[in-house]
Image: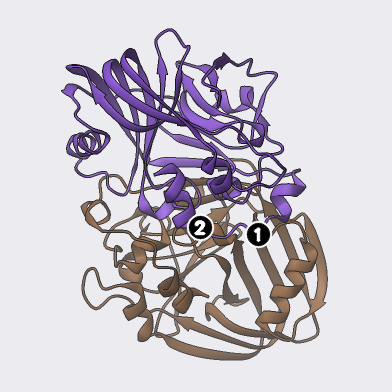
Chain colours: A brown, B purple
Amino acid sequence: MADNEVYQYSIISALVDGVASHGTPISRVLEHGNHGLGTFRNMNGEMIVLDGEVYQMKGDGSVLRIDPEETVTPFATVTRFQPEVTSKDTISSKKAFEDILTGLFPKARNHFLAVRLDGVFRKIVVRTAGGQIRPREGMVDVCSRQTTHTFENVTGTIVGFRCPQYVMGVNVAGDHFHFITDDRQRGGHILELQSEGEVEVAAAQMSTFYMELPTEDDEFNEAELRLQAQSIKSVEG
Amino acid sequence: MADNEVYQYSIISALVDGVASHGTPISRVLEHGNHGLGTFRNMNGEMIVLDGEVYQMKGDGSVLRIDPEETVTPFATVTRFQPEVTSKDTISSKKAFEDILTGLFPKARNHFLAVRLDGVFRKIVVRTAGGQIRPREGMVDVCSRQTTHTFENVTGTIVGFRCPQYVMGVNVAGDHFHFITDDRQRGGHILELQSEGEVEVAAAQMSTFYMELPTEDDEFNEAELRLQAQSIKSVEG
């Protein structure tokens, strides 16, 4: 794949429906990108792919570096990230950052964006999904037990995507960001953020989208994957 | 692209919102497949791609063979079709055919299917969209003026796709078939069908999906492309 094309394995609706027992080797996902988000078997933690390295941010707050040959993912989205726009911005909130991003790409409402922020953050609130307690437990129930962590004055990186509204169900419509600290010891799915002065913002528009569906996975094949926009919004928005 | 991968240009929601003034050269679409469906600028007629040849089935009932270098499409879906399953079936209705297809691929409810039928049909009812009467006129209004034609005892080919429920808005969820006669003189979007004895059914499951969005098209960029499942179902279902 070329730079700044979206690759995703499976669909977010499968997680909503609790399809998370199997997956594809993460090494296969990395063939398509070095920057992205995802989860692990049984929704056990949040995945961040940063410069081609993969980390699992677990519910207990710990972070593991993952061997992509040894680990599978039931859902992940990556791109070969090549920033098209860079800026330095002071960010007062997640909403304020979303407005900055819209300002950087005023004509991209119907396209995908890849995003990266680097710098010092006064405050970042993350959640981490702790995993299914039984097979087929849905994402909303899994996330009802999520742990949240607040980090203050941390240096780190945010990796994320903006997806257009019409892909809701296939992926997460809107903004979806994960964070990891520079020492790779803490991180999670971002609920709120505030920078300490200016941080580096890098982003790119993406106009091609490639999706690979599970084929030999009976759990996926048998699930009734209906569009559950409200459920996705409630836990990923 | 490999055999039996889905390629689509733009999204069905763009047509719903009347985005049909521009498009991509059909020759570029054909790089990704030789079998498929679509439409033309201003939704002027139904497109069928059969063995790599492209035909425009117009509202007045006429059929034109299209030069893919000279013509653009605002929305099309194709695959490099390689049948995985073939059978001979007598088909009593569109619904009955849909049940046959489900029986051929019992584990594919969350995947895409490509379909082709060849044979003699006792009766086929088609509609043909006659095109926008003003820029940005939406698909529902365009199709409110559709013409329908009933063909009896005709020999021809049906080309189509089944898409999973979760892609509604991106493409047409469910079944979507176009028909063209052997003499390439008549055809359209299938509303009803009945075979004359057995016809040849060929189909394949598709598990990878590739989508390319318009980039330099302000009409696309500025449209508010929200999911309008009911509108799509009303005209394409």
- Check whether the beta carbons of the residues at disc 1 and disc 2 lie within 8 A of each other: no
- A73 versus B56 height, above or below: below
Look at mark 2 in the image and give the residue it sits on: B228
Q: Read off the chain for label 1.
A: B
Report how many numbered discs are placed on residues in the image: 2
Q: Position of residue B234 (x, y in %)?
A: 43, 49
Q: Read off the chain for label 2.
A: B
Marks 1, 2 in one chain: yes
Alpha carbon distance from label 1 to label 2? 11 Å
Kindly identify the residue that appears in the image at 74 percent across and 63 percent down: A202
Q: Position of residue A72 (x, y in %)?
A: 36, 57
Look at mark 1 in the image and give the residue it sits on: B224
Using the rendered image of the protein, determine whether residue B34 is visible from the camera's viewpoint: no
Residue A76 is tagged as none
Q: Is residue B93 left or right of residue A76?
A: left
The amino acid type found where label 2 is placed reads: Gln
Q: Is residue B129 left or right of residue B181?
A: right
Depth order, front residue of A213/A152: A213
